[in-house]
Image (spheres, helix red, strand yellow):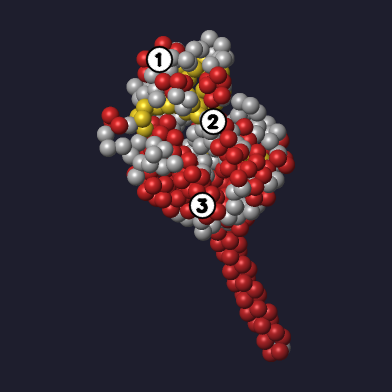
Amino acid sequence: MKKQIMTLLAIIVLGCVFAGCGNQSAENDVNNQEIKERIVQDISGEEVKIPPAKDIKRVIIVAPPITSVVIKLIPEQNMIVGLNEKAFIQSNDDIMEKVFPKYKNIDTKFVGEDFSINKESLLALKPDIILYYGEAQKKNLENVGVPIINFFSPKLTDPKDVTIAWENLLCEIFETEENNLLSDEWKNSEKLSKELLPKSDTEAVKALWIFRNVKGKLMVAGKSSFDAYAESYFEKAGIINVANEIQGTAEVNMEQIQTWNPDMIFVFQGVPAGAYLKNNIEGQDWSTIKAFQEKKIYDIPKTTYSWAAPCMDSPLMPLWLGSKAYPEKFTNEDFIRELKGYYKRVYNISLTEQDIKSILGLSENK
């Protein structure tokens, strides 16, 4: 009898021990569950729950401009499983092949021309996170059941602030150690740009930034806004924006441009610079404009994205503008040297003469 009692007590003790282990295991499960989520603050200031970096394996990018920064800062480029095709419209194929060789193989069918989303196609890509830009894109992504992270804020209108904010957020998302890469390049860019700045407005070059020229509709960029960064770039290069009376972008006529009579013109979208220089754009006569007469009309360069918008190569833009506006202070050869150095530092890529021609060919007026 005594032996049976001892056996029973042993079973009870062991049961308590296992019950305790079970409770401990349950607590660990809860703790592990808590660890599986973390919170980041996106560019708009909204808090978003996302998986730990080690669990982010599949990324979709809806916002075209940020692609150029993501492909540099993401731990592995093959993590990108979906892209907006518009990311390629404003890029240079030759340079993309070097920086992001497999970009043409990535799925783009889930997003339409108007940023509409085919949710079935999107979810078939099994994304862990989705990167987007602004409320218009957010509306198409609601209720997809995947963390969505906004890379737009109306408060950021300087390309320096925009790109550094993107870099900081991406480094936090992926827990990478590339912090301050863009910050350091902007410091170098600003140091060189300050040497180009004219002593007074009377010595400054006056320029026009053509935002778009399509089907006779001529839009120019005025003061900085979320869709045009002319003012910020011009200020960094010591150039006066002749359209600074305009807020954001606006359609103008040739009479207004003749009144402004810019020394230089920089072209973003639509009709290329060559057509202006040939003066063969239907319904537009550029022959009376000083920039036309002095052959100072340039296409804005493109690499992983157009330098007209915030991108990974944005620190190069003020230097390129300066080489056009003040060649006596910063020559084309000076800029090419900086361009090569930038690509070596940032991408570990040695640009060839053909690469340089590809980047600057359309922007060089012979």
Q: Nearer the viewer, residue 329 or 181?
A: 329
Q: CA distance from mark 2 to mark 1?
A: 24 Å
**Residue 280's x, y, as percent?**
56, 15
* 64 lies left or right of 110: left
| Secondary element type, mark 3 | helix
| Secondary element type, mark 2 | loop
Identity of the amino acid at label 2?
Lys
Identity of the amino acid at label 3?
Gly
Q: Residues within 10 Å of mark 1 (few under 14, many from 20)?
A: some
Residue placed under numbered mark 2 in the picture:
366
Q: Residue 258 shows which numbered tag?
A: 1
Identity of the amino acid at label 1?
Gln
Please report the residue visible at 41 percent of the width from the left and 38 percent of the height from the top: 327
Does 80 sit above or below residue 62? below
The quarter of the displayed image where residue 224 is located: top left
**Residue 343's x, y, as percent?**
55, 50
Q: Is residue 141 visible?
A: no
Q: Residues within 10 Å of mark 3 (few under 14, many from 20)?
A: some
**Residue 200's x, y, as percent?**
26, 34
Q: CA distance from mark 2 to mark 3?
A: 25 Å
Residue placed under numbered mark 3 in the picture:
341
**Residue 155's x, y, as percent?**
39, 36
Q: Are marks 2 and 3 in contact (CB under 8 Å)?
A: no
> In the image, which is nearer the foreground, mark 2 or mark 3?
2
